[in-house]
Structures are given as C-alpha cells and as structure tokens.
C-alpha cells in the first residue's frame, strides 16, 4: 500500500475518536447546566407534566452512560432530537439551516482564495509599492472585526447606494439571482478578512520557497521566471498554504455565526445564537454538533489534501 | 525575570519600529482605559433625551447614541472591559498553558500524551463555537466571556510552549545543567522555561488581539458583557440598529476595536523576529 | 574558436560595503578542467554566480566576464537566462538542496531540455532517460518518475549533473560537487565529470577547497584568498613549485605532507574582514614573508608562460 494511502487511512481512522470525543462534549453540555435544564428550557411553558415527559424522553433520570448510548443510538439513526419549543424535529430544522451556512462559508472561502492567492503570489514576487499595498491590506483585514466591516458594507451598499439588501434570504433553488443578491454582502464581509489571512500566508510561503536553494538551481537551468514561480514555487508553497486554509475554515465557521446573525440569514449559526439566548438547550446541542462535525470533516479533507500534496509524505508516514 | 526584562528592553531600547508603534498605541489605550473616569467628558450611562442620535460636535466628539448617551465617553469606559477581558483571558491561558506545555514538552512520552490529548480535543471545535457552548451552559456575562476565551486559547498556548520546549530541550546547555547535577525540576524551571518563553510571548500578544475581537463578537451577539456594563461589541449592536440615522454610533466603536487589535498585532509581529525566530507561534 | 572560452577581466563583486571578490583576472581555455581553490568564504562561489548571472540584486559587479568572446555583463537578463542551462551550466554543492522536492527527477532533467530546445515532451523525456543512463543511474526509465528524496545523495548529484549537461553546454561550473557526499561516492562523481568532459568536450571549472580533488582532476588551477586571486598555474606546477606564500601554506597543511612532521602547521591570524579589507594583498597580515609594500599596494602579477603569481615577495628576484 502506498504511503499516501496509508496516510489517508490513518487520518480517516483518527477522525473517529475525535468525532466521539466531540459528541461526548456536546452530550455533556446540556447535562452540565445548573439546575433543571428542562425547566429552564421550557420557561413559562413548564408544567410538572410536560417537564416529566421531556425528562423521560431525554433519559435525564437514567445513569449517564445509558443516556449517552441512547443519545448516540438515536443520532446514528438520523434522529437529532427535537426542539421542545417549536416541536419541530431537529433534523428538519438543521436540515433547512445547514445549506445556508454551507453556501455562505464555501462562497466566502472561494472568494477569499480567488483574491488572496494571486495577490499573495504577487506580493511575494513584486516590487516595493505592491508589497506596501498588500501589507496595508493584510493589517487592515486582520485588525478589523468582520462584523463591523459587515455594518460598514451595509451602510455603503444597502443604506446609501441601495444596490444590495441588508438582510433576508431566499434559497438558491427557488430564485438563484435573488439568493445571490442576499448572499453578496455576507459573503463579501467574511471573504475580506479571510483573504487577508490567505494573502499573508501565501506571501510568506512563497517568499520562503523562492528563497530556497532549489530555486537558485532552477534559475541556473535557465528556466523562465514564470515557470519557476508557478510550476515550482507555488507547488511547494501549497503545502503550508493548504494547512492554514484548513485551520482558517474553523475561524470562518465562527465568523459565519456572527455574520448570519447580523444579516438575518437562517443558517445554523443564527440558529445556535437564538437558541442560546432562549435557553433552548436541545437546539443548542444539535446545532453545535452539526457545526463541530462540519469543522472536523473539513479538517479531515485538508489533511487528506495535504497528504496528497506533500512530496515527502513517505517520510512523514515513516515517522 | 529575564524574559520580561528582555521584552521591556527590546521595546524601549532597541525596539523595532513595529513593536514601538504598537506598544505606544497600546500604552495610550491602557492609559485611556485606566483614566476613563477622569477623561470622559460625560457620564457614559447618562441618558439625554435632547441629544438622541445627535451628530458629533465639540463636546461630543463621537456623537450620541439612540438614548442620547455620549458615544465618546462610552467608548472610553468600554475599553476598560474589552482590554481587561482580552488581557485577563490570555494571562489565564498562559498561567495554565505554560506549566502544561512545559511539563509535556520536557518529560515527553506518556506524560506528553496524557497532558496534550485532552488539550488537543479542545481544538476540535471552532473557537467561537467553543466559547458559545460554554456560555450556553454557564450563562452570559463579562467574566464568563473571559473564562471562555481563556479556555479557547489554553490549547494554543500549551502547544506553542511545548513546541518551544522541545526545541530548547535539545540544546546543549540543558544537558550541561543536568550533567552538573541540577535537579530535573531545577533544569526545567531555571533553564528550559526562560528560554522557551519567547514564542509564547509573541503568541500571547497576537491572541490578545484576537481576544478583543472575540469579546466584541460575543457582546455583539448579546452573550458577553451585559448592559449596563458598556462594551464595544454591545455598542456596535446598538449602533447597527440606527445605522442610517446615526452612523457614528457604529463607526467609532468599531474603529476603537480595530485600533486595539492593531496595537496587539503590531507588538506581536514586531517581537517575532527577536523572540520567535523559528516561527513556533502562529 | 580562437582565444579562451572564458575570460575574467578585473572582476570585482561588492555586496554593499563588503568586497567579496577583488580584481580577479583569469582565463579558461576550451576543453580544460580548471580548478578554483580556496578556503570557505574566499569568494569562489560568488565568482561562479557572477559568471552565471545569479547574484542577488544587491551585488555590484565590475570588470568584464567574456564568454565565447562576448562580455556577458553587458547583456540583458533575458539573454543571460538563455545562456544558463544551455551554454553555461552549474552544478551545486548539495544535490538535496538543488532538486525540487515536489518533482520527479526525470522531469527536472526534461524541463531543462524543453526550456532551451523546441522539442516535444516525449522527445525531451526520452532524451532525459538517456542522460540519466549516461550519468550512471540504473533503471533510468523507472527512476525517471522518482521524487528526489527516494534517491541517495550520490544518485541525486548524478541527476543534477545530467540536468547540467542536458543541452551540451560549452562550460560547466561545478561548485564543490562532492563536498556533501561520502568519500567513496566522491571518487565516482569526479570520475563521471572527467568522463563526460572527455566525451562531450565540455570545459569545466571545478570549485573546491580540497587540493586533493584538484590534483586528481584538474589541468590548471587558480588559488583564491579573501576574494583575491593569488596564483594561477598548471596543476603540476602548483604542487611541485608553488610561488605564492599562501599556496605554500595550503600545501603544507595537507594532511599527507604534514603527517610526517607530526603536526599540522597553522597560519597565524584569521581571514580579513571583507567589509574593511587591507588595501594591498589580503593575505599580507598572515604572510610569513610579508614586506611593507604588501599591505598597502596591490601586488603585481608576475607572469611566466602559464604561471601567474600575485605577490611582492615572489616578484622581487625569486628565481624563474
């Protein structure tokens, strides 16, 4: 079996304990709430009768291990529980919210890469003015809180110019154009900060690679600069870049939570925040689980991509 | 302690331009925060119906918000909370993370796995999500936010210290100290620790910058500092409500956040060359 | 072609205040193996990079470097790039650092061919496989696809040499090609270089700090110290009748000769600070026979047929 395959399998298998540990953490969340979580959750709707029913449904009076097994069992059957306030099954609520979050994060990351990568390469190979400009962009992009940027963009594009709507959402499948109009500002908001990070990482990785001895030899071979930068340097720099992108996805997911709230997008992030504010614990549990799973899967994908890209992967696996 | 004095020296004497700029800004902000009661021209909580959504003028340089409160004074007081949470949370993460990383890196083997496994599990969740989870259990508030941010950064600090220790442990002076008969604890504390701290200081500075952003995000969502405690995030949330009529209520608090983050970033970046030449920190 | 293949005429290289190479003049004739010797940091590599045109932008080069009659220093970067890998090639010291870790070794040879010749990918590939075989890599067709780290140091260096010779250059500069390799492999690589020179009539400039290597392989040699050329002569003359005090010191320090005397002689003092070098001969501070003129006035070059020495002491009535 090749080193790459072995590495891929290793990563896949390691994901399982991570998912389990994460599920344990999420499971414990509700059960660590001081007082009676069900009573708090139901609030003014709490009656001795329905509190008891729900406690029974959630197995809260049974020993912890039994609870966990029951919960995991239901999970593996696709039953994420239900929202006891709206009475909707969580799989439905989350199923509707997930595509929104996915669209937001994927579009934002795609845009950030489309802008950050080329600018990063340019910054690494360009002259003084280009470097200063990108330096400024990076500093600004990293310091400015993304939700503040969101408000500024709303001020400019929605309030003043009235080109784009400040909030709202329409699914892509119903009306693609309207969907993109609603998504434009949120995606842009998230993408700017992310692009700054990608630019910085790309620039750093490219500079380091271009300073490596093998690049001098490439020049000694008389290869055109373009081939050196794109065919050789970028390929070698892609390894650290991919690693950072994977990490940044987590940050992006966090940012999405806030951005969804700001722009009123019905994604998993906003669902989480609303649920926390309402003390709607089962919903919190479900949405945290979903977001965390997304994060772990993206990390897995990044790891696999890294394994495919790193030429020295045999040595990594050997260790 | 040598690392701290070197830090101070590098900032004041040899200081690189970025660090000095960042440190100057930070010093100014800390001063402002500490002296807020003296510097603020108005009571930050004073409601003034006659000045609702009034624009900036000489006595109210940042304008007034939806309740007629002076935005400038509120920003000054909000800095106290933001800086306190940012600095406090990272210090807490350092206090727990440094010993953790030190022991894990120095002893290695099963001790390392035992200590770092649970810490790494914390990294399985995106930072903000982890903070939100903790807040959902404990309830919102300034102190909760501080604790939650410390928990988020604990694994990062521990990892940075551990990587740094792993590098130092292989240096000859460590073996030398051991050969001279210094106890393991002694070697660890007196030789390994001071020399490993560099990258963690850089990381701490960068994380303080992020902490300001996270605290602002949490408050923005209504899950951090609660009213009447002034907070930059809360001010942004309120300011967004009146964005068109009074953009200054949104612009100035946001600018305040950005400047604070910038200061920490500059300090961290500037220190990097001297304290973390091997790029252990992120 | 008449005249030497490569002429360095008063070449100096400065990096800001640091004078890395100072007024070096020498000639390399077609078909010979010319050795450039000196201790680490004496400017050998800098000189080689100057010929190749691979110095960083911070370097200031003065003088003339004539290759096949033309001064390359006056040519544009685009023109110089065309020469590299085609007419003039270079082999570096550490093959591990020279090869792109992400690329199959065969590809790295083939792309050198494609960069300078209008050939198809397949033709370049076949040519590359042939070259790999020629430099002694077994099972070349299979090894073509290997990434560099799957090959041993010696094999990697052979790949580097194959790359350098892919387009049959007139001049090959080999910068300490065996320093990073095991002693047993060293001999093989040097043998390979000589063999290829014989077969392709390539002129070779071999940079080394090891006089033994120079003795074995080179026809003529130049001795460099702190950026100045001290002596140039056919190799037998350098060993049999060295004229420059520095050359003599180098030879005296060779373990084989010194072993008999029991201790390695050490020249007192250290290498001068290149940011503030002595204006005259740079070896003067350490020279056992230095005279007043040595430290202030650049030494004259005492020229006999084929043997040049830059030394006041040698110039003043030292026999023939």
Image (spheres, coloured by chain):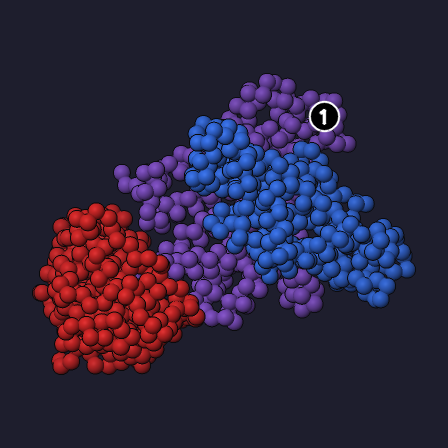
Chain colours: A purple, B blue, C red
Can residue B192 be seen here?
Answer: yes
- The x, y position of residue A201, in whole percent, is 48, 56
Residue B121 lies, with reference to residue B228, above or below; the image says above
Residue at image point 40% right, 37% down? A12
Residue at image point 16% right, 72% down? C319
- The x, y position of residue A251, in whole percent, is 56, 48
Query: Which quadrant of the figure has residue C108?
Result: bottom left
Q: Is residue A232 left or right of residue B250?
A: left
| Front residue (pair C210, B264) | C210
| Front residue (pair B131, A275) | B131
Query: Which quadrant of the figure has residue C50?
Result: bottom left
Identify the image quadrant of the C terminus of chain C: bottom left
Disc 1: host chain = A
Residue at image point 44% right, 53% down? A241
Q: Is residue C264 left or right of residue B46?
A: left
Q: Can you identify the residue that label 1 sits on?
A: A35
Residue A41 lies, with reference to residue C86, above or below; the image says above
Residue at image point 30% right, 68% down? C290
Q: Is residue A121 left or right of residue C300?
A: right
Can residue B257 be seen here?
Answer: no
Q: Is residue A169 left or right of residue A204?
A: right
- The x, y position of residue A80, in whole percent, is 56, 33
Mark 1, other Cα within 10 Å: few <14 / some 14–19 / many ≥20:
few
- The x, y position of residue A125, in whole percent, is 43, 66
């Amino acid at each position: 079996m090749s080193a790459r395959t072995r590495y891929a399998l290793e990563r896949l298998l390691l994901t399982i304990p991570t998912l389990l540990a994460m599920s344990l953490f999420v499971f414990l969340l509700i059960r660590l709430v001081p007082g009676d979580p069900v009573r708090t959750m139901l609030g003014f709707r709490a009656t001795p009768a329905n509190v008891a029913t729900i406690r029974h449904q959630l197995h809260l009076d049974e020993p912890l291990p039994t609870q966990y097994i029951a919960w995991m069992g239901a999970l593996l059957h696709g039953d994420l529980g239900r929202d006891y306030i709206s009475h909707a099954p969580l799989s439905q609520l989350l199923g509707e919210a997930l595509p929104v979050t996915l669209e937001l994060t994927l579009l934002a990351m795609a845009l950030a890469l489309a802008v950050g990568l080329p600018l990063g390469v340019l910054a690494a190979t360009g002259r003084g003015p280009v470097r200063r400009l990108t330096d400024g962009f990076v500093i600004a992009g990293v310091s400015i809180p993304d939700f503040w940027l969101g408000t500024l963009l709303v001020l400019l594009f929605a309030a003043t110019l009235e080109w784009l709507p400040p909030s709202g959402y329409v699914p892509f499948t119903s009306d693609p154009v309207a969907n993109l109009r609603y998504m434009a500002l949120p995606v842009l908001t998230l993408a700017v900060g992310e692009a700054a990070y990608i630019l910085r990482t790309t620039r750093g990785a490219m500079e380091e690679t271009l300073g490596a001895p093998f690049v001098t030899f490439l020049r000694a071979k008389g290869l055109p600069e373009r081939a050196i930068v794109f065919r050789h340097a970028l390929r070698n720099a892609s390894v650290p870049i991919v690693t950072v992108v994977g990490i940044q996805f987590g940050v992006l997911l966090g940012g999405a939570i806030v951005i969804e709230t700001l722009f009123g997008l019905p994604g998993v992030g906003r669902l989480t925040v609303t649920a926390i504010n309402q003390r709607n614990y089962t919903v919190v549990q479900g949405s945290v689980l979903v977001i965390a799973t997304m994060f772990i899967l993206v990390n897995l994908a990044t790891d696999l991509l890294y394994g495919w890209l790193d030429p020295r992967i045999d040595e990594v696996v050997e260790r | 302690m040598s690392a701290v004095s070197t830090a101070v020296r590098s900032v004041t004497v040899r200081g690189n331009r970025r660090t000095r700029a960042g440190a100057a800004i930070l010093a100014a902000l800390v001063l402002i925060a500490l002296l807020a009661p003296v510097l603020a021209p108005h009571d930050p909580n004073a409601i003034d119906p006659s000045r609702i959504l009034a624009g900036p003028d000489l006595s109210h340089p940042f304008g007034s918000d939806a309740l007629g409160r002076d935005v400038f004074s509120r920003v000054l007081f909000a800095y106290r909370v933001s800086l306190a949470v940012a600095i406090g949370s990272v210090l807490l993460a350092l206090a727990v993370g440094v010993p953790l990383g030190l022991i894990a890196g120095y002893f290695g083997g099963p001790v390392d796995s035992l200590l770092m496994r649970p810490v790494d599990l914390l990294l399985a969740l995106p930072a903000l999500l982890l903070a939100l989870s903790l807040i959902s259990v404990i309830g919102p508030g300034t102190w909760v936010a501080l604790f939650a941010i410390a928990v988020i950064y604990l694994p990062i600090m521990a990892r940075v210290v551990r990587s740094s220790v792993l590098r130092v442990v292989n240096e000859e002076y460590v073996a030398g100290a051991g050969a001279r008969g210094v106890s393991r604890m002694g070697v660890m504390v007196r030789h390994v620790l001071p020399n490993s701290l560099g990258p963690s200081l850089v990381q701490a500075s960068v994380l303080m910058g992020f902490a300001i952003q996270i605290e602002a995000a949490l408050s923005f969502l209504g899950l951090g500092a609660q009213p009447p405690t002034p907070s930059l995030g809360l001010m942004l949330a309120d300011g967004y409500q009146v964005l068109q009529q009074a953009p200054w209520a949104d612009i100035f608090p946001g600018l305040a956040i950005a400047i604070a983050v910038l200061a920490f970033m500059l300090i961290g970046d500037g220190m990097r060359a001297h304290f973390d030449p091997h790029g252990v920190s992120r | 072609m008449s005249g030497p293949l490569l002429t360095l005429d008063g070449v100096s290289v400065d990096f800001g205040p640091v004078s890395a190479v100072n007024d070096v003049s020498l000639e390399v004739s077609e078909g010979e193996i010319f050795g450039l010797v000196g201790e680490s940091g004496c400017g050998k590599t800098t000189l080689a990079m100057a010929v190749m045109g691979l110095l960083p932008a911070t370097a200031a080069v003065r003088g003339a470097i004539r290759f096949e009659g033309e001064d390359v220093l006056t040519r544009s970067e685009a023109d110089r790039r065309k020469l590299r890998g085609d007419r003039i090639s270079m082999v570096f010291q550490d093959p591990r650092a020279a090869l792109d870790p992400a690329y199959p070794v065969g590809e790295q040879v083939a792309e050198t061919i494609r960069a300078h010749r209008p050939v198809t990918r397949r033709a370049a590939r076949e040519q590359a496989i042939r070259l790999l075989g020629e430099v002694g890599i077994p099972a070349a067709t299979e090894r073509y696809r290997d990434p560099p780290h799957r090959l041993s140091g010696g094999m990697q260096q052979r790949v580097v040499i194959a790359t350098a010779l892919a387009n049959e250059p007139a001049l090959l500069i080999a910068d300490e090609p065996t320093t990073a390799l095991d002693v047993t492999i060293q001999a093989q690589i040097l043998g390979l270089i000589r063999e290829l020179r014989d077969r392709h009539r390539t002129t070779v400039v071999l940079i080394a700090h090891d006089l033994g290597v120079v003795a074995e392989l080179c026809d003529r040699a130049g001795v460099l110290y702190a950026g100045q050329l001290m002596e140039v002569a056919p190799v037998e003359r350098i060993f049999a009748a060295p004229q420059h005090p520095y050359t003599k010191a180098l030879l005296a320090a060779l373990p084989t000769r010194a072993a008999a005397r029991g201790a390695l002689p050490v020249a007192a003092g250290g290498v001068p600070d290149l940011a503030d070098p002595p204006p005259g001969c740079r070896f003067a501070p350490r020279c056992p026979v230095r005279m007043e003129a040595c430290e202030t006035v650049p030494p004259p070059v005492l020229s006999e047929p084929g043997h040049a020495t830059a030394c006041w002491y040698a110039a003043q009535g030292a026999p023939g």
